[in-house]
Amino acid sequence: MRDVLSAVVGKTVRQVARLRGGGSALPGLVIEKLDPGFLARVLQRLPYGVVAISGTNGKTTTTKMVVELLEARGLRVFTNRTGSNFSRGVVAAAIQESDLRGRLDADIAVLELDEAHAMYFIDRVKPRFTLLLNVLRDQLDRFGEIDTTAKLLQRIADATTEGLVVNREDRLIAAIGELTRARSGTAVDVREFGLSDALLATFPSDDDFHLSAKPEEVQRQHRPAADVMLLEIGDHEAVFGIDDEEYRTSLKLEGLYNTFNAASALALVRQVLDAGPFVPSTTEGRAAATNAELIAALSEVRPAFGRGEQLVLDGEPLELVLVKNPAGFRLGLASFEAEGVAAMIAINDQYADGRDMSWLWDVDFTSLAEAGVDTVAGTRAWDMALRLEHDDVAVGRVEEDLRAALSAFRSRTPGRPRRIYCTYTAMLELRRALADLTDVEDVW
Amino acid sequence: MNDIERELVIVSLYPRDMNIYGDRGNVLSLARRTAAHGFSPRVVDVNPGDPLPETVDIVIGGGGQDSGQGRVALDLAQRAEGIRALADDGVPMLMICGLYQLFGHRFITHAGDELTGIGVLDVETLGGTERMIGNVVLDTEAFGEVIGYENHSGSTQLGPGSAPLGRVVQGAGNAPDAGVEGARTANVIGSYLHGSLLPKNPAMSDFLIGEAARRRYGSFSPIATTPETVLRARESAKRRPR
């Protein structure tokens, strides 16, 4: 009865909020007040339980990959699709997708958990499976320190009941895997995803960045065997190693990070499918997949909005690359060839971006020196311009106002492919501006 | 009369462990400004266990994770005499955040653990629970208006042997209600400000370079001009919310 009431109240609030043009998390807020147990009850009824995905970089695209891999196996997946990755956003989404009796029409929930809000969530819902991607310097002004973030992720791992997938190339994340293995014995199935030795230098960690060693000298100590390993990266192409076999595939995903995170998605989905539903008979035979089938489904996944998104403006490709911390920016620069592409960088310092600009000084921009940057924009355009000046990167124009900057960038670079590196809120604003000019996909 | 062959050695202290708030930006900016004043900068990284170079003209250091700070405190204690001697000899130094704390007498963590510092600055820090985060504007006698960003939970008290770097116009400073920020004893400056600090505050770089040049070569004639980018970045940082 309680579920019926909560579902009805939530849906009503949602209607009212819509009429007022309110935010998507409002119904969640109301239900959290009225019925704090709603989310746990609804999610824990799902045949395959709850999957949590957390870490600093790549959560949204990885979540999208996992969802699409599971859907390709015929599973109905509930997820926080709007990127509203806070618990109330999850509650709001649950209300939206549940029937009037408070039942979700889904087999499994795959949820992206923001480090800052994960505690609130796991106090209510225990994930059956968890994937931890990485701990990178990100918005230190929100989270304090990297070690603090690592502790938060450890607590998500501790709350996980059956399976944990960790990045063995990330020192802090790998330690969480080892600790969980030592603590839980066989209760929790701990698996790793990783890189071949040859690729390690392509993905230097924050630690490596500050070691005086050259990237090719980067070495790792002994690492556990990886369930899924990224062996090679090409242009929209990758080779994955699974069960001692090599799988070469084309990819629609953009960027090095997404390709590495694809290995994590494969490892997580393999774990989920190996475990099957809580009650084996309900969907038996439907979900099991061969590695080749998983790889085929992966090759079809497109990037989530903003994470290497491709648009078309005036008949030329326009790429949006989200950059929100030093590691992400470094990989963004390494992922995309600078030559022949007009570049714009948009740096905002709203709360969601992080107010502190120090992070820009931990990115090496010399790869842009030859081609230069046409336009620098955003509330902190001048900080960015100052940073580029220190790496002798020529800047064409500095314009704080994003719409004015976009329009200048457009008229200054006719007939050329374009790329915009942007922080989170700059991306949201640019997408709105671009929606007036060209086709912009709905937010995934 | 500046000879480009004239070298200045900048020691970057513990870049591997103390690098968290864009401290690399200070090294980059200082080296660039040094060159703009007609000197040839040579940056030497000194990590735990590494010897200090024979010639040291400027020393700068940054902040780190708690885990890195413990390792650094041990190494710093072993070279305390050497660094104190350089400071006494007038070598200009700039220590940000974690190394600011360790250049004081001690840092007592919130849990009650004590990290012993080298006492070059007459300050002492108590770890707190309240984190001071946000854009900061200082009014300083030596460098005019200083603009930076703070993010710390340590509360630093100054003894009579150190003067504050400046008066806080916006932000917290050394402690939640301190009203002042940073510390200075002779040519050694400690501060919580990053952002990074030196790129937007060339007056501070000029002080470090000027003192170093006078000490090593007997004179300093500043020739670097300040690019418009610096002025605009300072203006926009001042306008931003805390």
Image (cartoon, rainbow, N blue to C red):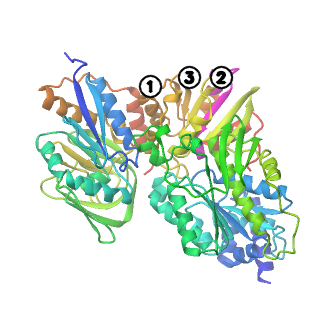
Q: Residue at x 75, y 74 (%)?
A: A42
Give the residue at the far top of this rendering.
Answer: B1
Residue B135 visible from this viewpoint:
yes
Q: Which residue is mark 2?
A: A411
**Mark 1 belongs to which subunit?**
A
In this view, the residue in front, B36 or A55, is A55
Label 3 CA crowd tier, 10 Å (few <14, some 14–19, many 20+)? some
Q: Are marks 3 and 1 on the same chain?
A: yes
Nearer to us of marks 1 and 2 is 1
Amino acid at the residue labelled 2: Ser
Label 2 CA crowd tier, 10 Å (few <14, some 14–19, many 20+)? few
Q: Is residue B46 above or below residue A65?
A: above
Amino acid at the residue labelled 1: Asp
Pointers 1 and 2 in contact (C-beta within 8 Å):
no
> Which label was assigned to residue A392?
1
Q: What is the spatial separation of the Cα atoms under label 3 and label 1, in whole angstroms?
A: 11 Å
Judged left or right of residue A162, residue B105 is left
State yes or no: residue A91 in magenta: no
Q: Are marks 1 and 2 on the same chain?
A: yes
